[in-house]
Amino acid sequence: MIKLPNTLRLYQKAVKNHKLDPQAAFELQQANFHKMAKKSHCVIDFYDKPPTINLPFSGAALAHKDVFEQDQRSPGLGSRRGITSKRSLQAVSLKRLELAGFADLGALSLSPHACSSVAQDVPTVADKNQTCLNPLNPKWIVGGSSSGSAVAVASGAIYGSLGTDTAGSVRIPAFTCGVMGLKPTKGLIHKQGMAGLCPSLDTIGLLARSSDDIDILLESIISRNRLVTHTLRPELLRVTGWVPTSKTNESSQTIDENIATILESFHQNLGHTLKHDHLEYEASATQMQAIMMSAEVGLTYRKSIQKGLATPEVTELGLQGLTQPTQWYDYATNQRSEYLARFVQAHFQFTDIIITPTYAHSIPDAEEVTVGHARFSPSKRLALHRYTSFVNYLGLPALVMPIAKDNSGRPVSIQLIGKPFHDRTLITYAAHLEKLIFGNEGILPTYFLSGHS
């Protein structure tokens, strides 16, 4: 019986040494993907295209958020199934992955129009509106909007996936499903063939189960190698951990004591500089991101909002943008470079990586972030973007990864932030942490799939 390697590097090595047949490996992954689709409800469409042989990663399976154009297929954007379109040409990023030998198994679910921080009912291959389920525990939230991408990766059915990140839409589902999620530096990845929500903020992001897999996928799709070459050994990198207390938290959201204790212990054990004061320019950058996002959602979906055809999330956010003063959007746009320069000057003079929390609480149950449910908690819903959206405004690279389990057995993740085009520095340090915490077997599924709380 075929046994698939845990990581892409091991997969490539096994194929090269003729210990793994790529066609047989592909067929096994395809079968696993179909099984996962029935269990987790995260596949919108299956693709039946066979793998290309004799390429570096021939037969290694991926699947992607349904926002990317395929040859003669227009994406459904989470509001419908994809449709045949003679005008559609394969997205640049998908083409580059194909040229490396990766097989694309299908289109994955997302919050409709990529405009929600949680998974919602979407059309699936079963032609029913279903919400995808977290493979770690079906009661837990699946973050949005790249929900299906995280679920498919966490389930072990595919090695990796592309999503999109506008305010945290790759990083939020990464932490709720206990996988790695990278939002690259703004401009590093070509967005041609990707349907946008907010053109100025949208970034193609990557999800995988190991840092090396993230690196391989990133290397396959970057437009041109603008990445800064990393030279220091990871243990020599200067790292600052930021764990705000209730007194310094500018949004008046306190971090759960258990989460704060885990994060503080993590930083102290690794010798990181630990700070509890506010992260300068973070709050104002968050505000600027909100202004830009609402304005561009309003512009993107103006006609459907006016006709009453837009989803509630798009309508609410878009109306905010259409009614706010245009000077706000102009200011946020014009000041963006200045904010970035100030942030880099303030925080990266004496440090290489900033580490923030990813979320202030334990991963919530789906009921706790579902509007209208008796257990709905507005603070837990709002907190999903608390530590992610400011990064999109600044255009910095950020990588989310799990580091531990909390008292209830749920993954606790951190967010690594670096200077522009220092994406590989984050990946290198994540690999260092991954080896220290999880050994050489990769993060999933062995650690976080070991049991439900």
Image: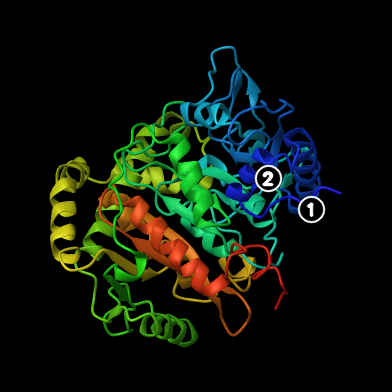
Task: Indicate the secondary structure of the residue bearing disc 2.
Answer: helix
- In this figure, which residue is indicated by the disc labeled 1? 39
| SS type, badge 1 | helix
The percent position of residue 260, horizontal first and vertical second, equals 42, 83
Q: Quadrant of the C terminus?
A: bottom right
| 265 with respect to 82 (left or right) | left
Question: Residue 29: where, in percent of width, then height?
Answer: 75, 43
Q: Quadrant of residue 426?
A: bottom left
Residue 327 visible? The answer is yes
Left-right relation of 12 to 320: right
Picture coordinates of residue 328, whole percent (x, y): 19, 47
The residue under the point 15% across, 64% down is 349
Residues 138 and 54: in front is 54
On screen, 55 above or below 152?
Answer: above
Q: Is residue 165 left or right of residue 277?
A: right
Asked if the residue under mark 2 is in contact with the one under mark 1, i.e. CB atoms within 8 Å, the reply is no
Q: Residue beneath label 2, please?
A: 14
